[in-house]
Amino acid sequence: MSDSLTILPEVTIFDIENAQERISSTVVRTPSIACPALSRLTGAEITLKLENLQAIGSFKERGAANKMALLTPEERAKGVVTVSAGNHAQGVARQASLLGIDATIVMPRFTPATKIAATQAWGARVVLAGDDFTQACITAEELRANEGRVLVHPFNDPDVIAGQGTAALELLQDAPDQDVIVVPIGGGGLIAGFSAVVAALRPDIEIIGVQVEAYASLSAYPKEDTPVLGGSTIAEGIAVTKLGDHCLHNMRNRISKILVVSELQVESAITTLAEKAKQVCEGAGASGLAAILANPELFAGKRVALPLTGGNINARILANTVLRSLLRDGRILRLIFQIPDRPGMLADISTRIGGYGGNIIEVSHHRLFASPSVQTAELVVMVEARDTQHAQQIETDLARHYIVRRD
């Protein structure tokens, strides 16, 4: 974080207040709600800012809306181009359709199909290029230069930052009594906007940033940011290897610390939000809760707000994430039985599991390849339990009657 950043323009509270007025007709004013279930779980008083309820399912439309509303008639006629893994892409595409602007969106080649389809549904042209955000940016710059389009950057633009800051402005208008706000960090546009609002209106509120392990470039904060290799992550919305300089400038010295969360912690947070808060949230959006669950001592007894930044998670990924979390929590058991190969054994095991209150959700019976003897069979049963203690009780009781182990 070099001193040269200080020459960059400051995003002010007036910029953000003007942005709020400018985008109010096309962007949802999302609710800020108390969540008693999460409060009981974490020991903090949790408030959720539900950006997953935006028309595109993400806060990203705020920045896109503000930037595009400020374009001149000549710039609108040229069309726009942007690069995004999904949420900003949909924001630009929707705003372009509302404003009658031609939009081209460059997305990395491995962007989830649901996000590509959602972007195309708003009428934008999608170009798939590069394996990651950095490579896709090269193609976007080429299109900007060759076609004369205006770049709508996903985060590194003062107008985009001001648009993202409107989420913080709404939060403090609707739920001002906060001690801490926990904000996910990808390119840095959202936390830069939050920092500007909090610094102007409530400098007593602590801001904590969250990054995922593979993209933890600010893990040494407030020291210099460190290079990261990146890689696959369920939090693809914050999978950015380097923050924008405008973002760094507007957040520097305004946040207290950076917390880094693991993939498994993010997965567990997605499941917890679905179960406890009844909110569908993508990995990036759930990273704030992941940080709270992983560091309860930092938040206990405090009033903590966190933006659920997006809800655009693939249905298959969501289902697999929930199942993986249930397996880790012990609420789903995968039991492997070695049983005599004779009639009635499966029925007897099913009856016992049902009698213990377990719910059988999958059964697999192997005779030829997995069994140690031609006289035995291997039975694999997946069972749902009420909680970890109930799961242990089921396994213990079954072990009194069968040779069984948990996979």
Image (spheres, rainbow, N blue to C red):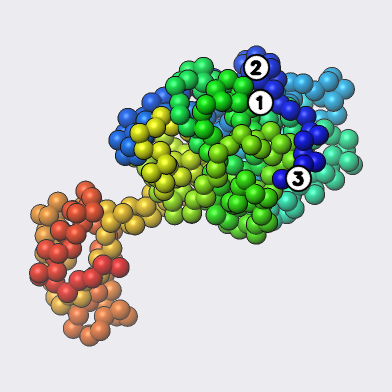
Q: Quadrant of residue 56?
A: top right
Label pair 1/3, CB-CB below 8 angstroms: no
Identify the mark nearer the N-term, 2 or 1: 2
Residue 2: which numbered mark, if any? Answer: 3
Give 63 or 217, whichever is nearer the viewer: 217
Q: Secondary structure at mark 2?
A: helix
Q: Amino acid at mark 3?
A: Ser
Q: Which residue is mark 2?
A: 17
Give 209 or 316, whichever is nearer the viewer: 209
Q: Which residue is mark 1?
A: 163
Rendered-image quadrant of the C terminus:
bottom left
Query: Where is residue 143 shown, x and y percent of the image?
Result: 84, 42
Q: Secondary structure at mark 3?
A: loop
What residue do we see at 80% from left, 41% from top? 4
Horizontal side of residue 399 vs 178, given as left or right: left
Q: Amino acid at mark 1?
A: Gly
Give 150 or 2, whichever is nearer the viewer: 2
**Mark 3 crowdedness (10 Å alpha carbons): few <14, some 14-19, many ≥20:** few
Kindly report the distance in space between the C-alpha atoms of the residues bearing marks 2 and 3: 29 Å
Residue 339 in sight in this render:
yes
Kindly report the distance in space between the C-alpha atoms of the residues bearing marks 1 and 3: 25 Å
